[in-house]
Amino acid sequence: MWQILGISDEVETCERCGKTNLKRTVVLTDGEGETYVGTECASRLMGRDSSYINRKAREVQYEADKERERAEWSTIMNAMHYRFLKLNVLMNGERSERRLRLGFEKVISQTGMTAETVIAHLSSRWGEERVAPLKEMC
Ligand SMILES: [Zn+2]
């Protein structure tokens, strides 16, 4: 029984038939390993048409991305300097660049995420404009 785990933009070769240069592959599991296959092979394996496979794969991937984003956000929230950052970015008009930089660097090092990832999360919550001072620090 095959199940769709998501979509991969990185694997471009179908592990089933060997077709190359695929724009994306569908990630399937049979409960044991994972396999990357083209839409046609996924259809054949699952006994469903390709529009079902495409729709379902997008849905599953969307949920997986949301879940990853939630997890990343809670990691940022848990980073000690979250409050400090928020205070500086959101509330304190006279923020000190140096303290802001230090806080930001600590969030980066504690979460292990890239500056871009942290900024993307913060801007989706707080708005691009407010996060602008952090962008200049990258
Ligand atoms: Zn194939």
Image (cartoon, helix red, strand yellow):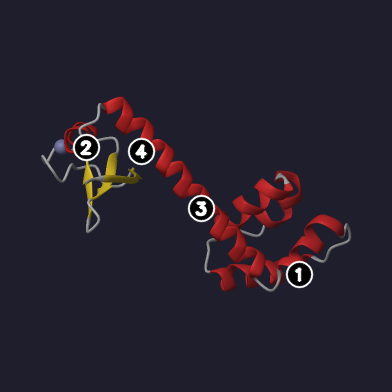
The type of residue carrying mark 4 is Ala
Mark 2 and mark 3: Cα distance apart in space: 25 Å
Residue at position x 19%, y 31% in the image: 40
The type of residue carrying mark 1 is Arg
| Above or below 47: residue 84 | below
Q: Quadrant of the C terminus?
A: bottom right
State the mark number for residue 9: none
Q: Which residue is mark 1?
A: 98
Q: Which residue is mark 3?
A: 67
Q: Is residue 16 visible?
A: yes
| Above or below 110: residue 37 | above
Q: Which residue is mark 2?
A: 46
The answer to which image quadrant residue 90 occupies is: bottom right
Ligand 1: does it lie within 8 Å of the C-beta at label 4?
Answer: no
Q: Is residue 115 visible?
A: no
Residue 106 rendering spot, x and y as whole percentages: 64, 73
State the mark number for residue 57: 4
Camera-side mark, 1 or 3: 3
Give SS at disc 3.
Answer: helix
Residue 1 rendering spot, x and y as whole percentages: 22, 46
The type of residue carrying mark 2 is Met
Mark 4 and mark 3: Cα distance apart in space: 15 Å
Residue at position x 67%, y 48% in the image: 123
Q: Viewed as shown, does residue 33 lie left or right of 127?
A: left
Give SS at disc 4.
Answer: helix
